[in-house]
Image (cartoon, grey):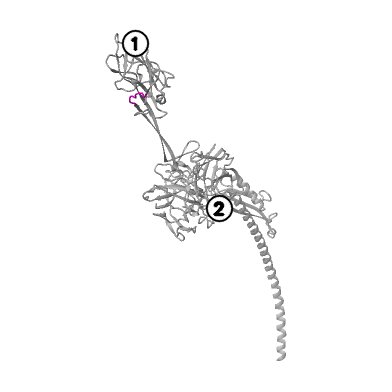
Amino acid sequence: MIGRFAGLGRLVTRRDGRLADAERGQVLVLFSLVATALIGSVAIVTDVSWLWVNQQRLQRASDAAALAGSVYLPGDPSTAYTTAYAEAARNGYRNGIGGVVVTPERDPVNPRRLTVRITAPVGTYFARVFCVGENACLETVTVGARATAEYTLPVPMGSPQSYYGVGYLVAPVTTTTTTDTTGTTPYALPATTVAGGTFTSGGNARAADGVYATASVSGNASAWTGFPILTGTTPPPDSSSTAIAGIEVRLVGANLTGSGTATACVVRVEISPDNGGTWSLPVNTAALGTTLANRTAGSTTSTSIWGGRAWTRADLSATNLRVRLTWIDGVTGCAATQSMRLDAVDVRVAWRSQETTTTTTWQQTAVQAPDGTTLTPQNFWGAMQSQGSPVAQGDAYLTRYDSRGTTLNAAYSPNDYYNYAVEVPAGATNGEVWIFDPGFCDTRRNYGLGEAWTIGGTNGAASPAAMSSYYDIYDTRETPYDTADDLLVATSGSTFQRMAHHDARTYAVPGDTATPPAASTDCSSATWHLGWWRLASGLSGGEKGRTYRVHTYSTEKANPTAQNNTTAMNAFAIWTRATGGSPKVYGIGSMETLVRLPPSTTSEFYLSRIDRVHAGKTLQIELWDPGDTGQMSGTLQILRPTATSYSPVTFSWTAKKGSTASGTSSCTGTGATNVTSVTTNSGGTSHFNGCWLTIQVTIPADYTAPLPGSDTITTEGGWWKIRYSMGVAPVGTDYATDVATWQVSVRGSPVHLVP
């Protein structure tokens, strides 16, 4: 048994050997097949990974090229393309070299978008062994990438016109009234008799008292002076416009006392304007008779009978005017035996005066541009606060302090604010930029632009704090987000630096008892005050158009602390013109406004221009310290342009306190969604004093930036507005003013890739 089992074991061993050999052959075949598949897979993965790596490199190059070139759109597509080619080359893909094709293209719908496509051949490692026919191996594979970038320019603010910040001006208006006045003085007797006359008792003719002067010899003559014409009742007005209309000499109680023929016995009368230095033409009286009667010479309607002299009021003074009488007898019709007697001689004059009355009143009026055209008011003035003012007075960036003189304003940035773009179109030359009322001059609340020393300052002190205002204009070199490369073109320098001025006319209004601050200078006659001052000239639009930047600020660069104690507000406006094109001027991103708000009235202002390319995006409006309208309640709305008019939009708002000063509003955490208005003041309570009010509006997806048919001011569509609605004014309040900082943006990075 044992042997049988032993043989069986050997048999089995032989069978297992044969089977093992067979299995080993099968494994070898399988291993060969698997190895071949594995090696092929590794080859495919390697080539696919290599292609993927190169495609990613192409994508990054396309992204970089699109981002670099898009910043030159929409105005300069050729430079955009050139820049895209250069950026692709810097990333290793030069157009036309080694089969590389770079294709930049401006979006046909959105001119601010640039699409860049790059294709390039990529060599393979293993795929080239797979050939189909002769010379059909996969040695290279063409790989491509595409990127689109959009450049969002700063949102234009405040003005679609060639001027910015032109409000209604309250200016002195001089009214001249001319009144024609006539009158006649009463007869005036002389006070004295000129010595040397040949009338007997000539002094008796000084008064009508029944005591007579007489003349019996032909040629007897005497002269009288001292007529109180200018000191009597109804004298000729003491005015340069007074003209003497007539002079009449009267002989009172004259008659004949002799014998003989008496049909032509007359008295010759002459008058002198210079105390007898010269005499007029002689004028004879009517013939005398035997009965006492009055006789006259001349008239109250004319002076021509006395000769061609133009008599003046000064000729009639008591020392200048003389009357000479000469008795004439012994002539035909008057016997030499005739004599005469005279009770008195007096004079009266008629006068005519054109009295001119000049009255100066301060009236609301439109501003005239430097070229004489009338500018349609935009209802607000450009403005800037002085450095020493507290931030809660409405200026977010130029006020150094949160609480005046103590806590600093974290947002204080005079080097960055405020900026205004001046676009000079292509081909335009001789461009000019003018500033209206660029310097500070206190015109009091009700007058001028509303400039004044503000609360907390030194108004009325012995030395009022001076305010500086500066205006610099730069060539932006078409890089609006980069001011480091801007080229200074012109500057106001120190022209409007440290001004402690007031307009004396505003302190002379009848019924106004205010007095100007001590030690301030009267600027009412300054040519720049309530007038235009040229900042720059010779600006050019070049071949593609050029944008300049006007920078306004109040802090002295050479002495940054010199204005720390200055608390004032300066209002201004900007106007531009050019030959061969119409420039535009508008706020860039942020602007400060001085708004005049009448009671029980809605007032609208251009807020910003939103292009159609922003359809579907979010518009963000930030208002610093809006609604400081005193006792007058107010609400505001945001208006979107439609094809026919302007319509209030639905928005959401939030508020955040930005000042620690006492009296600021407790606004943090307040807000609302899906509303069409926000109340800024409730009958004397400002809701956002020292606060940022942030409003977000979803721009409709079908928005087309229309130009409303009701807008006759501009031909440029897409301008949104802000509307203030004011309540009833308290007694004694004629309007409210609000100084606030406005800024508008479309949410998102200025330059970004579009998925």
Q: Is residue 300 left or right of residue 407?
A: left
- The span picked out in magenta is 184-191
Image position, residue 368 (x, y; %):
47, 38
Does residue 189 sit above or below 13 in this rendering?
A: above
Residue 16 occupies quadrant: bottom right
> Which mark, residue 413?
2
Q: Give the camera-side residue of 254 and 36.
A: 254
Within the magenta stretch, is there residue 186? yes
Q: Amino acid at mark 2?
A: Ser
Q: Is residue 686 left or right of residue 124?
A: left
Residue situated furthest bottom in the rendering: 1
Q: Is residue 24 left or right of residue 426?
A: right
Of the image marks 1 and 2, the number of the one nearer the N terminus: 1
Image position, residue 692 (x, y; %):
48, 56
Q: Amino acid at mark 1?
A: Asp
Image position, residue 633 (x, y; %):
39, 53
> Which mark, residue 329?
1
Q: Nearer the viewer, mark 1 or mark 2?
A: 1
Q: Is residue 649 left or right of residue 540?
A: left
Q: Give the camera-side residue of 428 and 10.
A: 428
Cα separation, mark 1 vs mark 2, equals 102 Å
